[in-house]
Image (tube, rainbow, N blue to C red):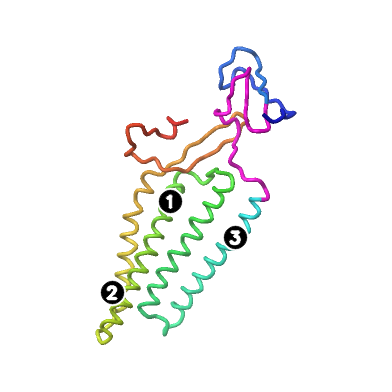
Amino acid sequence: MQSLADEYLTYNATSHPWNVTTTTTTILWYDNDTYYHNGTNYTDLEPRNQFVLPWWRQMIWTLLFAGMIAVATGGNLIVIWIVMAHRRMRTVTNYFLVNLSIADAMVSTLNVTFNYTYMLNSHWPFGTLYCKICQFIAVLTICASVFTLMAISIDRYMAIVNPLRPRMGKKATLCVAIVIWIVGAILSLPMLLFYTTYTQNFMNGEVRVICYSDWPNRDANGLSYDEYL
């Protein structure tokens, strides 16, 4: 066991979670994040948020994520602008590439940015509604990307196998793109229904909000987050 820290935490009996009868309770704080009171280990009570990354790791992740988000968002917006601003670039394949770029730009701005903040402190400050929306967008954009790549592959296959057959028109391409997003939204619907947040209060006054999935089909031994804690 490592040496004792110099700091002691004192709590009033009226607000103490252990329901002690004395007026004050002193808790010894060990360097290995183990907490004892009168010889009893209370580590599992999680008196503070132990999931906050150190500052140097936060700086590294910030630089990496900032570069990734800037390149992903900027590059996809440039692709969209090139195709839509130049008439000769408006082909069936390029329309599908625009659809793919929209999905990639959405995930980099509406999902990765918020999940990066969540990753730093394991704390979700954006509310229950956006917890649902963020996870919905994540699955939706993955579905849209995969289905768009499938559509591009099928279009290329038809062009190679039947080069003399007329290509798909712009209206047909638009309909395929709409169907892709509708199917993706249907497959992503469980994210809106079953993702929620859980608020965890620590003894030192910190609050940690967790964005997690609360699926209804748990097995006989499965516990909800509240029951587990």
Quadrant placement of the N terminus: top right
**Quadrant in which residue 98 is drawn:** bottom left
Q: Nearer the viewer, mark 2 or mark 1?
A: 1
For the magenta stretch, what is the residue range?
A: 29-56
| Residue 201: image location, x then y, percent | 55, 32
Q: Check the image and report above or below for 54 versus 60.
A: above
Task: Specify whether 76 is left or right of 12.
Answer: left
C-alpha distance separating marks 1 and 3: 20 Å
- Residue type of the residue flagged with mark 1: Gln
- Residue type of the residue flagged with mark 3: Ala
Mark 2: few, some, or many residues within 10 Å (few <14, many ≥20)?
Answer: few
Residue 213 within the magenta-colored segment of the rendering: no
**Quadrant in which residue 172 is drawn:** bottom left
> Mark on residue 66?
3
Please report whichever mark, 1 or 3, sits nearer to the chain's N-terminal start.
Answer: 3
| Residue 222: image location, x then y, percent | 37, 34
Q: Dots 2 and 3: beta carbons under 8 Å?
A: no
> Mark on residue 135?
1
C-alpha distance separating marks 2 and 3: 38 Å
Q: Residue at x 32, y 64 (%)?
A: 180
Mark 1: few, some, or many residues within 10 Å (few <14, many ≥20)?
Answer: many
Q: Residue at x 69, y 31 (%)?
A: 2
Total numbered labels placed on residues in the image: 3
**Who is closer to the viewer here, 96 or 40?**
40
| Residue 71: image location, x then y, percent | 56, 67
> Mark on residue 91?
none
Tag 3 secondary structure:
helix
